[in-house]
């Protein structure tokens, strides 16, 4: 092994590891990079020791790894700090930056759902077109399938099932957004489901029951679907129109934001699952259940437009200062 050539080839990696190991604070990405460079340099040191025992190089790398090892072990204590920063900065900032997309998605979704509900409620032709049976008492009647759906399973298991299903739907909406049409199809199918059910319940004179069961969990749950769909569509539009950045850079940047939203929505949908599993089928009066759902939605909106907006302004201020 030519030690000089080997050292020259890897010097940039070692200098970067040295730089990260001396920094007092590291971001999540820098901490991951530190661990990766530490492992790579450890392998390189082992290779040097086995092929070309150069004392000065071995001593230098050993000292570098010793310092980096202490920093790597120290980054474990920053885990909760990074989680806190994710919850107070990265996730709400990503939500706030994408709000025009998911608010727009919400408006179109609700318009389509209301239009379908009115169509199914007032026009018999809708049932023919959609293949809906004439008799729907099994679904819309008191104690029918619509109502018993929320109480036919143990609450804990039902909450977990709902969380898993909703997380899958949100993930599909997020990551098929890059192709645009699959995300639009998924959103339309959900709007169709909501609209048809609402129309059938309205036709049966039980719209109050529909809202009493849907609004407690559905308010925040549908908002999460809107966020997923809107953010996914933003990713797809970035591929079409990258703006001032190169297409790969723009998509990579928006892809990181999309991944941040995906991770954060796991927690939001967990809350939705708990509400649907424990609040929606509970014996509480419908106004109380609906109020709980509205309260959860209000907290989320304050989180986005309060915490998220502040986080974005802080990041913009930091970028301006850095310039």
Image (cartoon, rainbow, N blue to C red):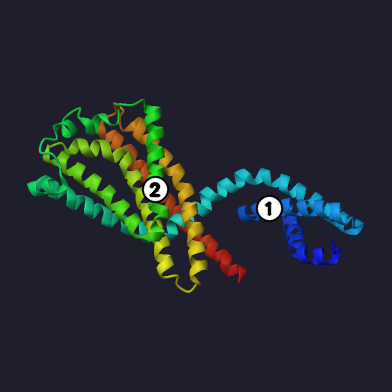
> Which residue is located at x 27 percent, y 31 percent?
149
Q: Which residue is mark 2?
A: 170
In this rendering, the answer to whether 150 lies above or below 221 is above
- Label count reads 2
> Which residue is located at x 51 percent, y 57 percent?
256
Left/right of residue 180 with respect to residue 246 in the rendered view: left
Looking at the image, can residue 63 be seen?
A: no
Question: In this view of the protein, which residue sits in the foreground, 95 or 3?
Answer: 3
In this rendering, the answer to whether 22 lies above or below 74 is below
Q: How far across and down, in percent of the image, does residue 194 sit? A: 24, 45
Q: How far apart in space, not on screen, are marks 1 and 2 (Cα)?
A: 31 Å
Query: How packed is label 1: few (under 14 Cα within 10 Å), some, or many (20 or more)?
Result: few
In this rendering, the answer to whether 173 lies above or below 161 is below
Left/right of residue 6 with respect to residue 75 in the rendered view: right
Left/right of residue 167 with respect to residue 47 in the rendered view: left
Looking at the image, can residue 61 be seen?
A: yes
Find numbered disc 2 in the image and state the secondary structure of the residue it sits on: helix
Quarter holding the N terminus is bottom right
Question: In this view of the protein, which residue sits in the foreground, 82 or 322?
Answer: 82
> Which residue is located at x 39 percent, y 33 percent?
159
Tags 1 and 2 in contact by the CB under 8 Å rule? no
Query: Which residue is outermost to the bottom?
Result: 244
Query: Which residue is outermost to the right?
Result: 55
Q: How far across and down, in percent of the image, does residue 31 sit? A: 66, 52
Query: How packed is label 2: few (under 14 Cα within 10 Å), some, or many (20 or more)?
Result: many
Question: In this view of the protein, which residue sits in the foreground, 27 or 39?
Answer: 39
Find residue 235 and name its label: none
Find numbered disc 1 in the image and state the secondary structure of the residue it sits on: helix
- Of label 1 and label 2, which has the lower sequence position? 1
Find residue 36 and name its label: 1
> Which residue is located at x 40 percent, y 29 percent?
157
């Amino acid at each position: 092994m030519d030690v000089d050539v080997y050292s020259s080839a890897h010097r940039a990696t070692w200098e970067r590891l040295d730089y990260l190991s001396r920094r007092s604070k590291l971001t999540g990405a820098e901490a991951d990079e530190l661990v990766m460079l530490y492992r790579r340099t450890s392998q390189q040191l082992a290779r040097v020791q086995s092929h070309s025992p150069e004392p000065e190089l071995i001593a230098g790398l050993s000292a570098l790894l010793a310092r980096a090892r202490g920093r790597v072990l120290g980054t474990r204590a920053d885990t909760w700090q990074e989680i806190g920063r994710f919850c107070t900065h990265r996730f709400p900032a990503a939500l706030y930056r994408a709000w025009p997309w998911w608010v727009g998605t919400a408006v179109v979704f609700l318009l389509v759902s209301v239009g379908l509900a009115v169509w199914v409620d007032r026009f018999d032709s809708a049932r023919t077109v959609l293949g809906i049976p004439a008799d729907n008492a099994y679904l819309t009647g008191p104690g029918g399938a619509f109502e018993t759906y929320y109480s036919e399973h143990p609450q804990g298991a039902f909450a977990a099932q709902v969380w898993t299903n909703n997380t899958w739907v949100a993930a599909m909406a997020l990551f098929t957004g890059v192709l645009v049409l699959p995300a639009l199809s998924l959103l339309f199918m959900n709007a169709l489901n909501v609209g048809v059910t609402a129309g059938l319940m309205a036709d049966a004179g039980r719209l109050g029951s529909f809202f009493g069961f849907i609004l407690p969990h559905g308010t925040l749950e549908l908002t999460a679907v809107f966020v997923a769909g809107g953010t996914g569509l933003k990713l797809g539009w970035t591929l079409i129109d990258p703006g001032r950045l190169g297409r790969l850079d723009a998509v990579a940047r928006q892809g990181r934001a999309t991944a941040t939203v995906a991770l954060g929505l796991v927690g939001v949908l967990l809350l939705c699952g708990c509400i649907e599993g424990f609040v929606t089928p509970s014996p509480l009066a419908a106004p109380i259940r609906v109020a709980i759902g509205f309260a959860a939605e209000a907290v989320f909106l304050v989180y986005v437009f309060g915490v998220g907006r502040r986080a974005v302004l802080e990041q913009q201020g930091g970028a301006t200062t850095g310039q």
